[in-house]
Structures are given as structure tokens and as C-alpha cells.
Amino acid sequence: MSSKTQLFWLDSLNEAQKTLNAFIADTSQLTKCEKFSKLLIDTYSNNGNVFTCGNGGSHCDAMHFAEEMTGKYRKNRRALGALALGDPSHTTCVSNDYGFEFIFSRQLEGLARKNDLLIGLSTSGNSQNVINAIKKAKDLGVKTVGLLGKDGGEMLDLVDLAIVIPGKTADRIQEMHIKLLHTVIETVERELFPENYRD
């Protein structure tokens, strides 16, 4: 590996570390993370389900979160209800008949109930299909969390809880989003399945 390539790696990793350190240093962000944990714990304690949605890399993060809940995170425990909205047949059907901006809201309308939770992921906060899902969630009495980036965009004032990563690029924002998702999963498990963390 050339020294130039090594320097690029070092710069990239240092930039990621700076983003994380800046987030940790902001106590208001940690308070929001605590609220995020409480919303999830309350949802599962009341027999609710969690829905997630996003586009591109954010959709991958939405799916990642859901499989950790229905599968397992670290140790075995019962499955927790979670679904990433936007399976291919639904997406092509709704985008063809109604428009791509309704792919999440239509599916949420058919599946979500009061006491459920929607997590919307958007690095800009301006993804129209995620915005429409949040609006539909409000109509259904479903609580909403936005994992956002930059200035939070339109979603900032729509969700019940917004956690905004003040990064400039989507990659750094998404790296923080997956860290938050992993950590909130662990907080849920520690509360609901304390036996998994005794050793």
C-alpha cells in the first residue's frame, strides 16, 4: 500500500472519529438517544411493532435494524416485531399505480396500528416518501422517530423525536445512523432481556 493511500485511510477514519466525538460531546444528543430507547422499550412493552423506512443506503440500514429485532442481536431471545417497509413487489405496485413517493405510506397504512413506532431514515431529511410515511403515521396514532442529517430538513419538525447528525456527507451520516441503531437495540435488550447481559 502506498503512503498516499495510507494517508487517505487515516484521513477518512479520523473524519469518522471526529463525527462520533462531536456527537458524544453534545449532551442534548445523548438525551435524545435516551428518549429513542424509551420509545422502543415502550413500544415492545405494549405489544407494538416497529416499522422502518429509508432510501438507498438508508433502506439498507432500515432492513438491518429490522433483522436484528426479528432475528437476534447478540444472544438468543424471542423475536421482536420489526419490518422494513418497501419489499420489491409492493414497491413496484405502488410506485406504478400511485407514485414512488407513496411506497412507504401505503404499506404503513395497511400494517400499522396505534402503539406501533415508525423510524424514518433520511440523510437530508427531505425524502418525500419518508415524509409521507411520517404523515400517515400521525394519522394512525403511530409514534415517529427521524434519524436525519445536515439540518434535519422538512422531517425535523414532523417527527416526534428527531436525532440529527450534523455531517456534511451521506456516508458519515449513515455511519452514525447504524451506530445509533445498534446501540438502541442493545438498550432494548438490556431492559427486556437482562439475562442476556449477566456475564
Image (tube, helix red, strand yellow):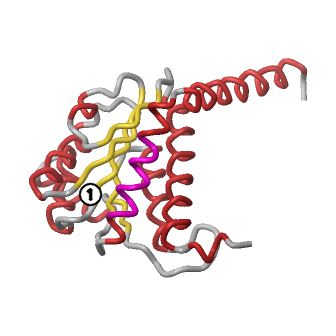
Q: Position of residue 147 (x, y in %)?
A: 39, 41
Q: Position of residue 88 (x, y in %)?
A: 33, 61
Question: As displayed, is residue 72 above or below residue 164?
Answer: below
Residue at screen point 25% across, 43% down: 160
Q: Amino acid at mark 1?
A: Thr
On whether residue 38 falls in the magenta region, the answer is yes
Residue at screen point 50% across, 66% down: 191
Q: Quadrant of residue 106?
A: bottom left
Name the image quarter holding the C terminus.
bottom right
Question: As displayed, is residue 14 above or below residue 49?
Answer: above
**Pick the front one: 92 or 26:** 26
**Pick the front one: 58 or 198:** 198
Name the image quarter holding the N terminus.
top right
Residue at screen point 48% across, 63% down: 188
Q: Which residues are magenta?
A: 32-42
Counting other residues with Cα less than 10 Å from the Cα at mark 1, is it few (<14), some (14-19), or many (20 or more)? some
Report whether 150 appears left or right of 46.
Answer: right
On whether residue 127 falls in the magenta region, the answer is no
| Secondary structure found at label 1 | helix
Residue at screen point 48% across, 51% down: 61
Q: Position of residue 23 (x, y in %)?
A: 55, 30
Count of labels shown? 1
Report whether 102 appears left or right of 65.
Answer: left
Q: Position of residue 116 (x, y in %)?
A: 25, 64
From the image, tell me which residue sits under label 1. 91
Report whether 35 appears left or right of 155.
Answer: right
Q: Quadrant of residue 41?
A: bottom left
Magenta span dominant secondary structure:
helix
Question: As displayed, is residue 146 above or below residue 125?
Answer: below
